[in-house]
Amino acid sequence: MRARYGVPLSIAAAGAAGLVYAAGFEARSFRLRRVTVPVLPSGVRPLRVLQVSDIHMVGGQRKKQRWLHSLAGLRPDFVINTGDNLSDPEGVPEVLDALGPLMEFPGAYVFGSNDYYGPRLRNPARYLVEKLQGKHGLNGNPPAKDVVHNPWEDLRDSFDAAGWLNLTNTRGTLKIDGVSVELTGLDDPHIKRDRYAEVAGGPSPSADFSMGVVHAPYLRVLDSYAADGYPLILAGHTHGGQLCVPFYGALVTNCDLDTDRVKGLSTHTAEGRTSYLHVSAGCGTNRYTPVRFACPPEATLLTLVGREQ
């Protein structure tokens, strides 16, 4: 009897322990990633940019709120929020409380699909199936009729009132101690709300530095930014793969980006031009899959320095 059932019971016990670790510890083990990116023109002082992404706030996530509060102690030059702040239609007040100290700094934002629509329960295995089928996002289809519409307008109004730039298919400029930082943003490509034609043309010659900002790093968007000559692109969405294999990495990206670039700093080349790409693994999860494995939640402090350094 012991030989017959010992192995299955051991596997079940290991699976249960892994689930407890993934949900109870790693999903709440918040980290700060620090990255140096040589993208600034000569003579421009270093800039410290805090990127927060994929908060996916659910009511009662006090530890996440306290950790986001603490990031203000980094004193960044400016903040970039790359979307998916919500995973609960009632979560707007808690998002605004969590980001309140950061909203005292200059900043800008784009939204992701989960800012607009509530999450739906789905089998995680579908992400692998969709990858094999070459499907990503809603493929241009409208959301299901019973989808929950999140109060994203309340987020927008509060971010705008704090002085953060709304980069929804538009450009904006921040002045940081006399340095002109141009930001070119897009709405979420995951649900085909991006309109690159409205912002095409590349960096403005009047800006000291320009960068692209988007929620989901789809290749069509990265190609456009890189071909237009943006030295840096910031994105989120992927959750770093969320459930990764130790010593191997991510299995999926939930978009058409390859798994080698699912998180962290890499490059992207199109039409002979190369941009740095930083993809945040984000600090939250969909409320229906509140687990992470070999991929802790994060925010990133990017220090932008001169190209010659």
Image: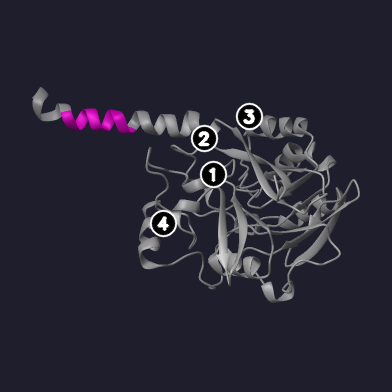
Q: Residue 227 occupies which quadrant of the picture?
A: bottom right
Check disc 2: other Cα within 10 Å, few if <14, some if 14-19, many if 20+. many
- Between the residue at mark 1 and the residue at mark 2, the CA separation in whole angstroms equals 8 Å
The C terminus sits in image quarter:
top right
Residue ranking furthest to the bottom = 197
Q: Which residues are magenta?
A: 7-15
Badge number at residue 285 = 1
Say which label, 1 or 4, has the lower sequence index.
4
Say which label, 2 or 4, has the lower sequence index.
2
- Between the residue at mark 1 and the residue at mark 4, the CA separation in whole angstroms equals 14 Å
Say which label, 4 or 3, has the lower sequence index.
3
| Count of numbered circles on the image | 4
Q: How is the image coloured?
A: one colour
SS of the residue under disc 3 = helix
Badge number at residue 63 = 3
Instruction: Say whether marks 2 and 3 touch (CB < 8 Å).
Output: no
Pick the front one: 202 or 20: 202
Q: Position of residue 58 (x, y in %)?
A: 61, 41
SS of the residue under disc 2 = helix
Say which label, 1 or 3, has the lower sequence index.
3
Q: Residue 99 occupies which quadrant of the picture?
A: top right
Could you tell me the amino acid type at mark 4? Tyr
Q: Please state if 178 lies on the left or on the right of 165 as rendered.
A: right
What residue lies at 90% left-to-right and 45% top-to-bottom? 177
Instruction: Say whether marks 1 and 4 touch (CB < 8 Å).
Output: no
Query: Does residue 278 sit above or below 295 in this rendering?
Result: below
Mark 2 sits on what residue? 27
Say which label, 2 or 3, has the lower sequence index.
2
Instruction: Say whether marks 1 and 3 touch (CB < 8 Å).
Output: no
Pick the front one: 267 or 55: 267
Q: Position of residue 203 (x, y in %)?
A: 76, 66
Mark 4 sits on what residue? 127
